[in-house]
Amino acid sequence: MKKLITVFLLSILASSLYAQTSPGIDYGFRLGLTAHPTLGWVKPEVGKSDGIALGFSYGLLADFNFAENYCFATGLTITTINGKSTEVNIPPYYDGGSGQTAYSLRYKLQYIEVPLTIKLKTDKMGDIRWYGQFGLSNDFKIGAKQDADIAGKKVKTDQGIGKYTNFYRAGLIVGAGGEYDIADHTSVAIGLTLNNGFTNIASDKNRSVKNHYIGLNIGVFF
């Protein structure tokens, strides 16, 4: 994981140096910081979703502007995706006996997230540029815990479920928002992003669970 972070940071540095030294039109490269809440939910194939749960995301943002109104937008964030569900006969709680037992579950999954997206921007309208964003979310699990209840009675709290969840998660990113200039080289970005997971987060081949979140994006570019 340290190698992944090192390679990502070196690629950003190399791209920044290239943008500063390459001839021709320079549309710019920007780094930013973000910290914002997420509203997550899980959707099991068998069972039901029990509403949203609050999470959090923070880290780096990077925009590689390859044309006046278009950029490749990526980043490196620590993102928590929480969610609630009701599922039947779920490991590691179910012992394989007869009958069916329904568990009320709260997933608490944490990822290193590397989005690969295209951001389309309008011309400035005063000090604001509006944008739309579309692309792929690449998430690498760094933590996985779960709370479990049966009929309102606590079974487990912060149960480690690392071996019951997959390391890699992919999602579709759709977002929109605006950037407001507060100085010559500084802007604040505020928007909404839907991260729609489309890979199974459960490693058990007999079940399928997907997690999703909406992020209230708040970032500062320098």
Image (spheres, rainbow, N blue to C red):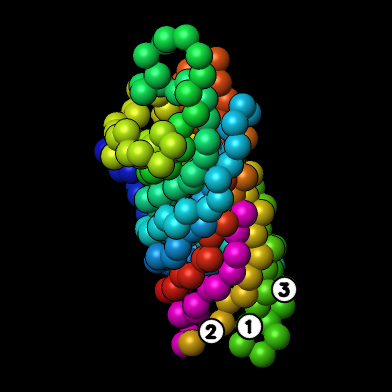
Provide the residue designation for mark 3: 122
Name the residue rendered at 55%, 73% in the picture: 190
What is the three-letter code of the residue carrying label 3?
Thr
Q: Earlier in the sequence, mark 2 or mark 1?
A: 1
Residue with the mark numbered 2:
181
Q: Which residues are magenta?
A: 183-194
Q: Residue at x 42, y 27 (%)?
A: 165
Question: How far apart are the alpha carbons under marks 2 and 3?
Answer: 14 Å
| Label 3 Cα crowd, 10 Å radius (few <14 / some 14-19 / many 20+) | some
Q: Is residue 15 visible?
A: no
Query: Image height check: is 96 above or below 37?
Result: above
Q: Residue furthest bottom?
A: 126
Of the pair 78 and 201, the residue shown nearer to us: 201
Asked if the stretch drawn in magenta spans residue 187, the answer is yes
Callout 2: helix, strand or loop?
Answer: strand
Mark 1 nearby-residue class (10 Å; few <14, some 14–19, many ≥20): some
Q: Which mark is residue 128?
A: 1
Q: Label 1 is placed on what type of residue?
A: Ile
